[in-house]
Amino acid sequence: MNTDQFTSDFLPKEIVLKLYRDVPIWDYQQQIDLVNSYAETVKETMDPDVFDIKLHHQIGFCYWQADAHPQAIVHYKKVIEKLKPHHYPFLYFNVISLLIRCNRLIAEFSESFYWCGIAFKYLEATTSSFDKLNILTEYVDVLADANESFNKEYEPIIKYVIADLGFPETLTDPLETVNAMRTTNHIWNRKLSDVELSQVHLEDTDQIIRAFENFKQHCPIEWYRNYAENAINIRKHK
């Protein structure tokens, strides 16, 4: 399998714009027809396994955003049949998290827990603690809906993510801790996105630096503070 092809976009920008600007999300069949039509034009240029993985992932997403969860599950399973954790960890754990969530939303909790088990089994395949946090948040959502208790076997993962990303939270009740981390991460990820988007409108480098410095001063997550510091240094040495 040519795993290098995973890092390139499957759909060109003009198709993406047409999908999300011109076709309503509830009209998933029109979206899928558009995806399939374009896919046929690039099929011969791609590794066949990578092509199938990317195609089913995109079709699954069309179903997912239209809340057609059983249909999305069918395609996400087809992705996992060919995609292994070491092939492309980011995509693998993204699809696993969606399998967990789709099954939870249709109250198929045993299936959700099955995919949680698969995710935790292979979690060391990803170096990203954000992937790990994402799986933890999907897991606690299933626990809440199914009224089940947190498996203490997974508590070291929480501690690792806290230490690796530099969260201000400490492990107390696992569900409360993961939910607090989710909230903190969501807030500061959004704030960082706002700072980066502001660069489009701010031509003054000093203003951009001040925006990152203000972010860094208030952000409680070390990973984001380090990111901001790096952004500041890049702009100071341009």
Image (cartoon, grey):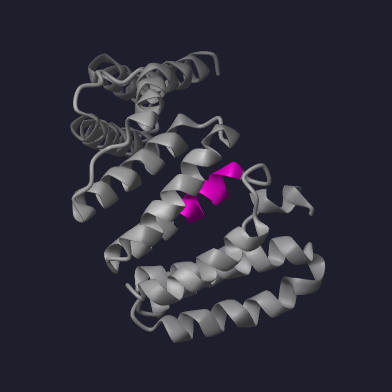
Give the left or right position of residue 10, taking residue 19 as reference: right
Q: Work out whether 104 lies above or below 87.
A: below
Q: Which of 103 and 211 is in front in this view?
A: 103
Give the quarter of the figure containing the N terminus: bottom right
**Residue stretch rendered in magenta on the structure:** 89-97
At a point 38% along the width and 31% down the height, the residue shown is: 154
Q: Work out whether 98 lies above or below 167.
A: below
Residue 88 in sight in this render: yes
**Picture coordinates of residue 53, whole percent (x, y):** 64, 63
**Picture coordinates of residue 125, whole percent (x, y):** 59, 36
Q: Which of 142 and 221 is in front in this view?
A: 142
At a point 36% along the width and 21% down the height, the residue shown is: 159
Give the quarter of the figure containing the C terminus: top right
**Picture coordinates of residue 8, whole percent (x, y):** 66, 53
Q: Does the magenta stretch include residue 63?
A: no
Residue 10 in sight in this render: no
Task: Determine the main secondary structure of the stretch shown in magenta.
Answer: helix
